[in-house]
Image (cartoon, rainbow, N blue to C red):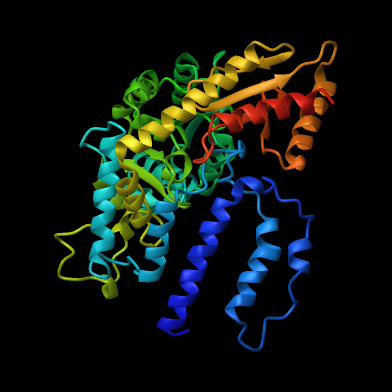
Amino acid sequence: MTPEEFRRAGHDLVDWIADFRATLESRPVMARTTPGEVARAFPKTPPDAPQPIDEIFATLDATIVPGLTHFGHPRFFGFFPTGGSLSSVLGDFASTGLGALGLTWQSAPALTELEEVTTDWVRQMVGLSPAWRGVIQDTASTATLVALVCARERASNFALTGEGLQGGGSPLVVYVSGQSHSSVLKAALVAGFGRAYVREIATDASHAMRPEALDRAMREDHARGWTPCAVVATSGSTTCTAFDPIDAIAALCAEHGAWLHVDAAMAGSAMVLPECRWMWEGVEAADSLVLNPHKWLGAVFDCSVYYVRDAQHLVRVMSTNPSYLQSAADGQVKNYRDWGIPLGRRFRALKLWFLIREQGVRGLQARLRRDLENAGWLAAQVAATPPWRLLAPVPLQTVCVRHEPPGLTGEALDRHTQTWCDRLNRSGAAYLTPAVLDGRWMVRVSVGAEQTERAHVEQLWTAMQREAHR
């Protein structure tokens, strides 16, 4: 493809994306395809001859788009808010077009330095002190893995330089709560801790980790010769937006010498609002934290910002320095290959930089406040309409609900919950995510797609009542 052919196709692609976004509300939210249906639409062998671009666009319309659940749809209320602001799409497009590869600072100086700038912008936006340094990872799952590897090495006096976890030292323990994201357990297992040394700490009535239970567990482990290594505190849990008491947990981590990692993947965006920062009080005492601008803030996936207080410790654990990557600038610059697992990195900072510049802090704050108001409105409707029940506090934009007809309990109530939610999703009118809370199924309503206004939340509430009463 020549630059001129690309120019024509690129204009067509931008028009196609703009038309797709403009017509998104008229489309069903959830994909209606059956398993294997999309794959069967394609030949089993690759095309031998070049295919016209027009035919590729036609396939996008006919086969690919119907096979997608649209996270950016104004009536998408599942999982977490995402979908990507169009300004961020432009940044991602520019990144791909530039083709920059951040192996070293010298391989792409602007890639490295813009990442430094944008992660520091976000630091300021969420009210963190200048003590923090940031790096863009792909997802919070990777950031949590990096945090636990760093915690492991600090607690083992850098065993990776010797026998690693094969050295037979004191078992290292990671502490989580039942509301921790599933990626936390996965990260602990991949980091080599072992399931037996991941301890689940009890939560209180608001589903937040209980500091006294954590303290008791740490003391028990010390007594048996185990080493408290790391605590992963959740700042806005996935299921019900629970906030662990970070200040109390941080004090225990300091006492026991454990690493504190704060998972604020979705809720971290809320800290752009000064009035929400009380929710992660004590965060300045943590060792690391993660927040995902590709969730509620509106950056295109994938864009997860990982912050550390001791960057040199991170570099010591993650550093690699083969001769072919060395340059005369190394002592003066930051090489992000030493800040995470991958050697190479994409120019992810561009999509975040485009977003922040195009919307500004005030624009981002206005959208977040709109979502908080819409979630509060829905919570009020649920609370005022028996037999609907609000199951958890609504500090942000996630509303946990259950429709509880008189006399329906236990597994029968679970079936009712899953049935009406599935019926609503399949209708195409909206998309919700069922989940288990306190041993029973309920439905999460996650408000925050960029195009979602009050009218869409009102439409959702009407549809929920219709499907639950069928």
Q: Give the answer, above or below, for where 220 lies relative to 298.
A: above
- The residue drawn where x is 82% and y is 28% is 415
Point out the image quarter for the C terminus: top right
Q: Position of residue 18 (x, y in %)?
A: 51, 57
Which of the 4 image quadrants contains residue 77? Answer: top right
- The residue drawn where x is 40% and y is 40% is 290
Residue situated furthest bottom in the rendering: 49
Which of the 4 image quadrants contains residue 427? Answer: top right
Q: Give the answer, above or below, for where 276 lies relative to 296.
A: above
Q: Give the answer, above or below, for where 287 lies relative to 16.
A: above
6 sits left or right of 66 in the view: left
Q: Give the answer, above or below, for where 332 lies relative to 267.
A: below
Q: Is residue 423 visible?
A: yes
Q: Position of residue 442 (x, y in %)?
A: 70, 25
User: Which of 46/132 is in front?
Assistant: 46
Q: Position of residue 17 (x, y in %)?
A: 53, 60
Q: Position of residue 460 (x, y in %)?
A: 66, 30
330 sits left or right of 464 in the view: left
- The residue drawn where x is 61% and y is 86% is 50
User: Which of 450/435 is in front?
Assistant: 450
User: Which of 185/356 is in front?
Assistant: 356
